[in-house]
Structure formats: structure tokens, C-alpha cells
Amino acid sequence: MKIRPVILCGGAGTRLWPNSKNHQAKQFIDFGDWTLLGKTLERTKALIYDVPIISTNKKYLSKVKQHLRKNKINKYKIVVEPAKRNTAPAILSTALIKDIPDNQPLMFFTADHLIEKMNIFNEAINKNKSNLNENNIFVFGIKPKSPTSDYGYFLTKKIKGNINKVTRFIEKPKEVKAKEIIKKNGYWNSGMFYLRKDSIINNFKKYNPTIYRNCVTAVNKAKYKSNIYHLNKASFIKATAKSFDYAILEKTKEINAIKLDIPWSDLGSWKEILKMYDKIKNKYIKKKNFYYKPWGRYTNLFEGKEFLIKELYVKPKGILSLQKHYHRAEHWLVTKGNAKITLINDIIVKKPGEHIFIPLEAIHRVQNSGQKPLKIMEAQVGSILKETDIVRYQDFYGRVR
């Protein structure tokens, strides 16, 4: 029996757009002829997978269908949630649709993760298919590349059959605590799940029977047309809004881990997005997009909807003007050299790999006081992303009018 991929595609992704009413859900952002949902759909084409199921909401339905057409996926099922109830009701309702056998393995992907080396990922889930049963759940751990508070972690111990049993979850620790967790062989918790349909049903019956009853009714009363299940709203909104973690994972003890050492990110921050663009920037560099300034140069790499990605090259002793912007905030990721940054009344030094956020209308500047070039990846986020949106207060090169 093949593994049924399920894509959770209802998230709003508001963390990336704190100052915008017209934010885009992360899974649909065009990062340069590709989206995270598109890459997730591509993963489901591997031979080990059955027809994909996408769990989404009415607002995103047309975009999901567009992505399915673009990725040439003709066989699929879509489950439309009539209200936001978090991941527990979404996962359960998707598993309850009638064409899934009770013992079929289900692989729950989120629509907005970037995963590389999928051959290793697929080998791992295929290898563990025989370890699935009517009660257990497998979560996916990613070997940390650095201590960070951006992700949750978990710890494991070996049990019979060389299986990694999860002993503890740690929710987004501070960096000092994260270092201790990594020393204990802790892994990032990726938020993906692998289990059988009957395990989902049994766990909800045992630990959250109210969610179970309401989701069963929502599915039984769903309207089905053209591969799309529209869940019954009156029943679905009665299901308690809980994450799968709180509804099930915190209660059951039958949680195992698949531990992977592969490139992975949830692209949940502009820092992670800038890291990604720094890795793939050569695809976007064009000579016509080089702009030379007295302090060095900048290169426009990609302009999306309400965001612009640049690389700044600041020559030794180069210094940008003291300035602010009315229509955009900025995120800077230092990739080479040391950046001496003025932000309002503070002087901050950032090293390679470090990030800083420049809020809307905050007075700021950056200078390279070293002997080697300084490189910064920059994300401008806002309604106007033009060089005209600069108010200069001081400028070493006489550009203040």
C-alpha cells in the first residue's frame, strides 16, 4: 500500500507581514517562479506516494487549484475547512474522508516548508512504514545547524527495534538552553507527522472525543463535488480549536522520531528567507541590476509582491547615509565582514550570520569600518520599494539636500 501525502495548506503566515493588511500566505509567495506549495506538491510525485490530499480553506481554494494545474497534478482530493480551527481538526477531518483505508500510512506535510534531499526523506519514511501501528505517531526531527529559538526541539532514546522514542518536547527555547539541548543530541521539531489513519482515529477517540465527534459529523455531512469535500460548517465550528501538538502529542506516549540530517527550513522569518536567497543568488544576478554608489553598490535580486531582495556591497570605510523610510521596513543579514549599524540611538555591530530588523521610520545607517568588503542581504518589506522613499539626515558624500 502506498503512502498517502496530506498537505496542510490553511496557514496565514502573518509573521512575515507585521505592517501589512494585504499580506500573502507564505505558501503562495512567488519567490522567483516558484512557491513553497509548488515545491510541496512536487514532492508528492515520488513513486512511494498515493494521490495527494490538500487541506485548505475557502479563501485559498482557487490558489490551491491553480497550483495543482501548474504542477500537472490531475488526481487529488481537497478538503475545505469552513472555519479556522487549527491543525487538530484539520488533520482529523482529512483522515476521515471515505476513500482512505484504515491502515493506510498518511504523511502530513505543511505547505510552507523548504526541504532538500527528498530521496533521503523518502527512504526514511519507507523504511519506517512497517513500524506504524494503530496507535503510534512518528514525528520528524532535523539535525540542528545552530542553536536557535526559532524552532522547537525534542529529545529521544533508543528502544526495541532501533526505534527513536520521543522522551520530551521543548517549545522554542532561548539560545543558551538550545545549546544544552543540542549537546544532549536534541533535534529540531519540524512539525510534520507520519501515522496510519486508524492511529489518528484511535488517538482522537481517546484524548479528544469532542473534536472527534464533531469532525465525524462535519465529514459525514460534507458536500462532495469534483474531488472537493466542503466540510459541514455547523459541525466543524463546534470542534475545539487546538493544534495537533496540544490535542494529541502532549497526551500520548507512543511518539517515535525519524531523525534526519538534511537541509530544511520553514522560512518562517525574513532571516531564513535571506539565507535562502544568499544560497541561490547566482540564479538572480544580472549586470543590469547592479547599481553603483559612492559607498559601494547594491544588486536587486528579486522583487515580489510587497518585498524586494537586495545584496549590499559596502567597500572598506564605506558608509551609507543616516536615513529613514516612510513606506518600508528592512531586514539585514550580514554575510561577510562586520557591520557597524546605527539604529535610532544605538550602535550595534553585527557579524556574518547575524540579522537585524529596521522598523518603519526608524533612523538608521550602516558602515564598514574594516579593511575588507562588507556584504549584507537585505529584504525591503512594504508598500513602496523605491529609492525615492529615502529621507537623509547625514551623508558623508554630500547627498543631503
Image (cartoon, rainbow, N blue to C red):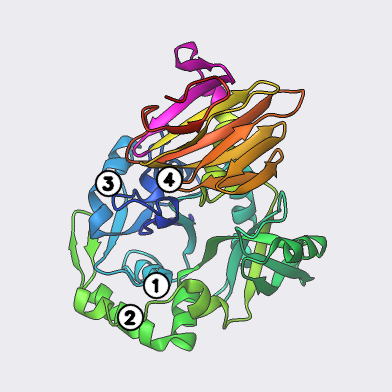
Q: In which quarter of the image is residue 205?
A: bottom left
Circle 4 residue: 361
Magenta stretch: includes residue 293:
yes
Q: Neighbour class for label 1 at 10 Å: few (<14), some, many (≥20)?
A: many
Q: In this view, does 138 lie above or below 262?
A: below
Dot 2: element: loop
- In this rendered view, identify the residue nearer to me: 314 or 168: 314
Amino acid type of the residue tagged 1 in the rendering:
Leu
Q: Residue at x 34, y 38 (%)?
A: 305
Q: Give the range drawn in magenta.
A: 281-306
Dot 3: element: helix
Q: In this view, does 193 lie above or below 299?
A: below
Amino acid type of the residue tagged 4 in the rendering:
Glu
Q: Distance between the residues labelled 1 and 3?
A: 23 Å
How far across and down, in percent of the image, does residue 29 sit? 38, 42
How far across and down, in percent of the image, does residue 159 sit? 77, 72
Q: Which residue is drawn at 64% across and 28% down?
A: 375
Circle 3 residue: 63
How far across and down, in percent of the image, does residue 321 sit? 53, 29
- Of badges 2 and 1, nearer the viewer stands 2
Q: Give the mark, 1 or 4, whose residue is nearer the N terminus.
A: 1
Q: Give the mark, 2 or 1, whose residue is nearer the N terminus.
A: 1
> For residue 239, which numbered disc appears in the image?
2
- Of badges 4 and 2, nearer the viewer stands 4
- In this rendered view, identify the residue nearer to me: 254 or 364: 364
- Of badges 3 and 4, nearer the viewer stands 4
Dot 1: element: helix
Q: Is residue 259 left or right of residue 56?
A: right
- Tell me whether the residue at label 3 lies in contact with that at label 4, contact meaning CB atoms closer than 8 angstroms: no
- Tell me whether the residue at label 2 lies in contact with that at label 1, contact meaning CB atoms closer than 8 angstroms: yes
Dot 4: element: loop
How far across and down, in percent of the image, does residue 309 sit? 47, 32
